[in-house]
Image (spheres, rainbow, N blue to C red):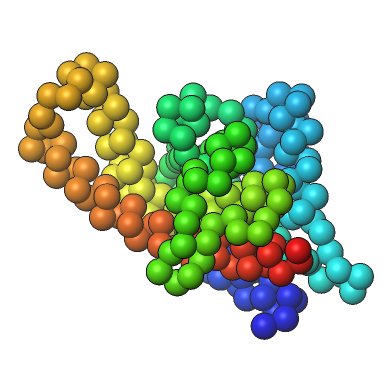
Amino acid sequence: MSPRSTFVWVSCVLTSLAVPHAIAAAAEPATAMETGIVLDRLSHEELRQWRSIARLLHASAPNGAPLYPTLRGLWEWAAESGNAIYIELSAPECVAKGIAGRFVIERVDPHGARHVGVIRLCLANIDRPHVGGAGTRADGFVRFAGLREKERYAEVLGHELAHAAYDFGSPERARMVMERVDTVSAQLLTHRAQRGNEPLDPALRQRLGERDALLEGLEAHADAIELLVWRELAKRR
């Protein structure tokens, strides 16, 4: 599949997931109703790091076709979906959990007009090859294989944007993910903070089981999109 046809395919998939909205540009000065990629949680230094990642998203071939069509399609979905997706490049959970990245839903609009989420990229962790599920998978995909620093960041960004696009595909799905994943995970953290390693009550155990089952499917979807992103990035090496 050519880069342009891949870009068209990804754009069509993301369009089918998104609720129709007026197009809104991703600008840095944030307002209460800003949509798209929102950068007002970044420090001056983090903005510099983000711009170096964003250059990959906008890279084009001499004929104008995007060099990384899957990333470009995800970016354009985020900019045009009508939702607000904040970017964070440092968060306490990066250190606490050693994760590469995470997408969290902060607000679900019951009317589907403007959901709010945050993508956290843990840059220091991504620099460690063993973090974030690196290693050979069943399909032969090796996360980060052959990629340089900014390309690794872009790969994780693609994974988290895939989560955002899928989770925000409908108000019902967004609400389900928030209730079964983010809310239940917060309940587990509260339990551990208050009761340490005491046994979980049956209701919380059941909710955790439902959370893990849902997460398995969500991660499989994001992994499939990440594989496309990795292939495009590795191809240009």
At a point 64% along the width and 46% down the height, the residue shown is 153
Residue 203 point in image, percent of width and height: 11, 38
Judge from the rendering whether residue 208 lies leftward or rightward of residue 1; answer left or right: left
Task: Assign the C terminus to one quadrant of the image.
Answer: bottom right
Residue 142 point in image, percent of width and height: 52, 61
The answer to which image quadrant residue 188 occupies is top left
**Residue 26 vs residue 42, the one in the foreground:** 42
Q: Residue furthest top?
A: 194
Count up the numbered dots.
0
Residue 148 point in image, percent of width and height: 71, 51
At a point 69% along the width and 62% down the height, the residue shown is 233
**Residue 133 vs residue 176, the one in the foreground:** 133
Q: Residue furthest bottom?
A: 1
> Residue 26: in sight, yes or no?
yes
> Residue 28: in sight, yes or no?
no
Above-or-below relation of 38 to 189: below
Residue 46 point in image, percent of width and height: 71, 30
Q: Residue furthest left?
A: 202
Task: Assign the N terminus to one quadrant of the image.
Answer: bottom right
At a point 42% along the width and 33% down the height, the residue shown is 97
The answer to which image quadrant residue 58 occupies is bottom right
Above-or-below relation of 227 to 90: below
At a point 84% along the width and 64% down the height, the residue shown is 60
